Amino acid sequence: MLVKLSEFQEKSNIKYRGKNTEAKYDYTAFLASTDRVAIDAVGLAILKLLESSDAIMNRKIFEQEQIEKTVELGLGACSPLEIDIVSVDPESQKYCGGVVEILMKG
């Protein structure tokens, strides 16, 4: 999986808002994968990084219903250990590390 995460700054003009409706995030990411489970898992890790809804925050990534079902069907990665996240530039490396940490914790 190739990931580019850059410029994750509070108080920007991007409309995404997590749980905290006062905080806004400038979030630019490019995600690519041939593994549909891996891409969903990384997407959920990013939503956790952004402090998303309770439905996402209160369950581990591989315990989310859509991930569990696709793993059960053998459609992709069965655990975070099977997912490689590659930063394409030094600026993105810090954020990739945060995503990996969340992915591993669930």
Image (cartoon, helix red, strand yellow):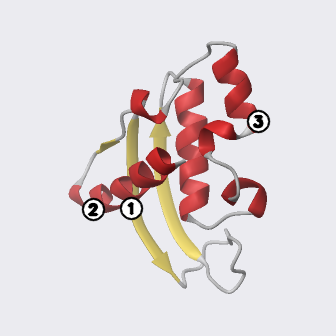
Indicate the secondary structure of the residue bearing disc 3: helix
Q: What x and y, as percent, mark residue 46?
A: 54, 54
Spatial CA span between label 3 and label 2: 33 Å
Query: To which residue does mark 2 refer?
Result: 91
Closer to the camera in the image, 41 or 32: 41
Identify which amino acid the numbered label 1 is placed on: Ser
Q: Amino acid at mark 3?
A: Glu
Query: Residue lying farthest top?
Result: 74
Q: Cα distance, mark 1 to mark 3?
A: 29 Å
Q: Where does label 3 land, which residue?
A: 65
Measured in 3D between alpha carbons, the distance from the residue under mark 1 to the one under mark 2, in whole angstroms, is 6 Å
- Disc 1: which residue: 6
39 displayed left or right of 59? left
Q: Are marks 1 and 2 in contact (CB under 8 Å)?
A: yes
Q: Residue at x 67, y 32 (%)?
A: 67
Give the amino acid type for the residue marked by disc 2 in the picture.
Glu
**10 Å crowding of disc 1: few (<14), some (14-19), many (20+):** many
First in residue order: circle 1 vs circle 3: 1
Instruction: Give the residue drawn at x 34%, y 55%.
Output: 97
Q: Earlier in the sequence, mark 1 or mark 2?
A: 1
Label 3 or label 2, whichever lies nearer to me, is 3
Decide if residue 34 is on the left or right side of residue 98.
Answer: right
Q: Residue at x 52, y 23 (%)?
A: 77
For label 2, the crowd category at 10 Å Cα-Cα, with few meaning under 14, some 14 to 19 and many 20 or more, is: few
Task: Point out which mark residue 72 bears.
Answer: none
Residue 89 pos. (x, y %): 24, 52
At numbered mark 1, what does the secondary structure look like: helix, strand or loop? strand
Q: Quadrant of the N terminus?
A: top left
